[in-house]
Image (cartoon, rainbow, N blue to C red):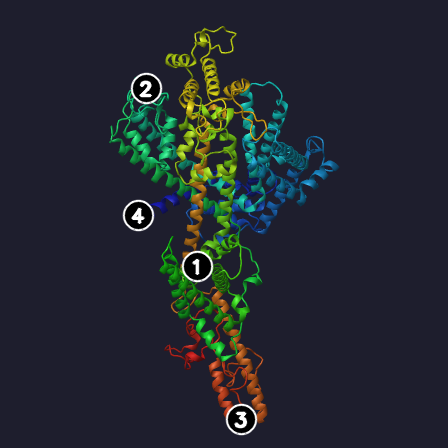
Amino acid sequence: QGFAEQKAVQLQENLLKMQEGLLKKLGGLHEDDLASKIETLFETIDADGSGLIDKFELKGALEELEIFLRPKELQDLVKKYDVDGSGTIDFEEFLSMIKELVRKAEIAVAGEQEGQEGNKEALDDDEMKKAMAIHDATQAERDSKKTTVNGKSLKSLYLFGEQNPVRKGCTWIAQNPYFDKLILACIFMSSVCLGIERPEIGDDSPERNALKSIDVFLNIVFTSEAVFKIISLTFSEYIKNGWNRLDFMIVTTSLLDWGLTEGFKDANVNLTVLKIFRIFRIFRALRPLRIIARARGLRILVSTLMSSVKPVMNTVGIALSVFAVFGVLGMQLLSGKMHFCSDPKVYLKEKCLGETEDGELRTWMSHPVHFDDIINAIRALFILATQDDWPDHMWAGVDATGNKSGRWQNHNEVFILYYIVCIMVAGYLIVNIFVGVFVDCYNAAASEMEQPPTNQKISKSKLHDVFDDPESALRLQICDIVATSPFDLFIAFFISTNVITMAMESFKQSDWQNVFGVFTNFFFAFVFGLECSFKMWAFRPRRYFSNGWNRFDFFIVMISFGGIAIDSIGSNGSIPIDPQVLRILRIFRVFRILRAFRIFKAAKGLQEIISTLVDSLPAIVNLFSMLALLFFIYGVLGVQLFGNICVDGEQAQSGMLATRCLLTAEGDLLDNHANFLTVPLALLTLFRVSTGDAWGDVLSASQLEPQARNVSLDLWTTFTATLGRDPGLLDAGHADYIPYYDIDASQNDVSVKLAAVAIQGWSNTTLGMESDIDWPFPGPVAERAFLWINLARQALPGCLTDEDVKYFEDRGLMDCDFGGYSRVCSGSCTLMNTSVFANLYFVSFVCMATFVLLQLVIAVLMEQLANHDGDAVLVKPLPGCEALTQVVFSRIYRRWRYQATIKIKYLNDVRKTKKAAGLGLESNFMSPMGHRDNEVSPTRPSVARRVSREAAADSSFDFESSPGAKPRPAKYLDGHDPMPPTPPSLLDVKGALQEPPPSPEDRIR
């Protein structure tokens, strides 16, 4: 309580300071001066000159006046003064708002009591007229400025005036709905082309030519759209819209990519320049984002997400600070100590030289997750926060020894505490704080952006039909049985038992299991079929199929009978059916499992959960659509960035096609189930990353960089011994000359030429052995072939750059033609030979997909469940009463309708009887409820039957045989609901009934 009081006092003090600041700026001003100052402020905020400001612009205007409101307060303020309900504030509403705030501030500072009704009145008519006059004059001046410049009409692109036929034509095209549909179709076509794109498509193949033609067509269409809109709106107005800016950026980058590709197609350009041009191609992956501007749900979702980013930046700053602190601590403990030799038998760095017993080169390498610098330390903490294979990373740190020594098992067990604290703070605390704050900001922004409910007519399809009870006594008796809760529980028992029996099946089951399965299948099919038949006969088909659960039951029963028939035909062989067709038809047996879903019918709690899921379906569909769009965009980006990285299995391709990936170490190859060769494989890889399944390994394999190239003396000695001569002693003009002994020669050139000679030696050794099962190291020459490739790997460690590939391709040592079509080989390193793109790609995807969108799906479901529980508490009825839901209201209406029908029939019978007996009786028999002061106009059917019997005693008319004289209980809804409580109007002062209650058999439902 003390904390709450302190918080209330602090809020009151802040409010008083805010009011004092407002009075310093606007207090004591004359009304005209105040209106003029407010007008100037309004013009400053209203940048587009539309005369309207939204909630965010209003927030900026109030902050300039030292008025700081929370989102909920700002939303309430907008609702209060937004008279026309447009969601925006015009000048009159803004002026009225500021004047009332100034008036309240004057009252509060003067010490008067707030909340008096007299101080909350709006501006009078004279003040409003003055404000409107000032606003109209300013608006006219603004419009004249907008349409004219120096007395001349504003022209689009300095060429097309407002009445220019070209501009009118562009406006008509840009606003034409069919043109918008064409753009939407082109966006879809562009997305399909991006999904088809893959590195293995030949340069001169029909598929590549078709994709190029479609890309040219799409560039023309999208460029035309931008031109039409720019001419129609003028460039300044066009570029103000954020979605137009996105479209303009995509169109510009597409045109640059297209122009540079065509311009330098046959030119001899430096490959470094072409790498820069490849960056423009990446922006093509953003084309699917244009669909957001045309989908209202996605547009609102993106706006909500963007509006919630700014408040989350404080949390991001805290997270980065914590990561930096723990990263610096990790650097102090483990910097440079997580290295080891590729040969586990070697412990010291100085001895990690030469080759292993298997002929592989020993290399001094680092653990993928290390703390050598602050960037890698923060990256390591981020991976630990996602809990991706954290035990392996922890034991790698525990086994670390020193800068020049390798791993030693359990060398520093105290480091376990560091990793545990990092996971608890970074993984459990910081990440969940970020998710919680983002979800809270998202919910707040969503509540601000939600539209006020509008009065909509109830669709007739949502109103259930009203059915009368059957007239047949037998059908009515069966109706009384099948429409009760005990009968539903009885069927629920069979449903549960059926699920248990189906769970008893197993693979290669025994004979008694087969017999038991067949018997139970027949038995439960018979029980459920009997239930369906009884209900359909009692309710009639139209009433039976009006209920969704009944339709579901009927579908299950028909599927069960169909499965039994197919099994009987297959086992007896009475009808000749192709076994392939029979196996396909037996899929009906799978639908038997749907019987388990019938348990929802009896479990009200499960029905509420399903109802909550259905209510949250629109929001979840938008989130999943955004998630699917994010996956697709990142999938296309992954193909563009990492599609050239070698995958395990590509080194076994035939001929010189295997050369590109043979020089990549096997540990650096992407897994054949997690790669970016095609968009579908990229989507599958991203789904694996989003689940946190060893995504750090994919990241490590995707950030291949060319390592330092230096031909050591040992490598040169092994190379010359294998070759049989020293290429460094050859003449400089010789084809095999390698300038190893030339001091001025570049080490990169020496390494590339050495690798070229080694590849040529491998090719000569394995010539004609492509069909061998052990290719690329055929059995007869496996040792020598591996020796040549190992020499090339030592000369070019890491990966191959585009320059290396071009050198080998020009000398016929590498051939990437595929499927009979030519294809230019690309390097096996990541884009621009740097790991920056890979780190940004995976970290941003994990943040947006795992930490944001997937968590928002859970948050939306939790919010819907919380709202459902809150609504249930708010509408909790009094003891003995029911909440007025649609079902209850429908039941009340049906009861009233049935009672009114019975009363009308009764009054007609009484009138006929009295008339036949010669007694004149005047009654309001056409009124559904009748006159309550009429002795022969009862208010309940039970009383009607009693009066009917008394009247029959005085006449010869047989009321019992007349229609409606002996009403039966009506079952208008499934289930047997209890009798509603007696209204208070029927109770006397002591709480006793004014007249005896009806018997159970006379109650009308």
Q: Report the mark closest to the observer, 4 or 2.
A: 2
Q: Which residue is mark 2?
A: 352
In the picture shown, does residue 371 fall above or below 446? above
Where's residue 608, x and y in %?
A: 43, 58
> Could you tell me which secondary element the residue under label 3 belongs to?
loop
- Estimate the spatial distance between the alpha carbons at disc 1 and disc 3, rounded to whole Å: 58 Å
Where's residue 123, x and y in %?
A: 55, 50
- Estimate the spatial distance between the alpha carbons at disc 1 and disc 2, rounded to whole Å: 64 Å
Give the total number of marks visible in the rendering.
4
Q: What amino acid type should be assigned to the residue bearing mark 3?
A: Ser
- Estimate the spatial distance between the alpha carbons at disc 4 and disc 2, rounded to whole Å: 67 Å
Task: Answer whether residue 113 is visible to the viewer in this image.
Answer: no
Front residue of 133 and 925: 925
Mark 4 surroundings within 10 Å by alpha-carbon count, few (fewer than 14), some (14 through 19), many (20 or more): few
- Estimate the spatial distance between the alpha carbons at disc 3 and disc 2, rounded to whole Å: 121 Å
Q: Which residue is mark 3?
A: 955
Which disc is residue 2 wearing?
4
> Could you tell me which secondary element the residue under label 4 belongs to?
helix
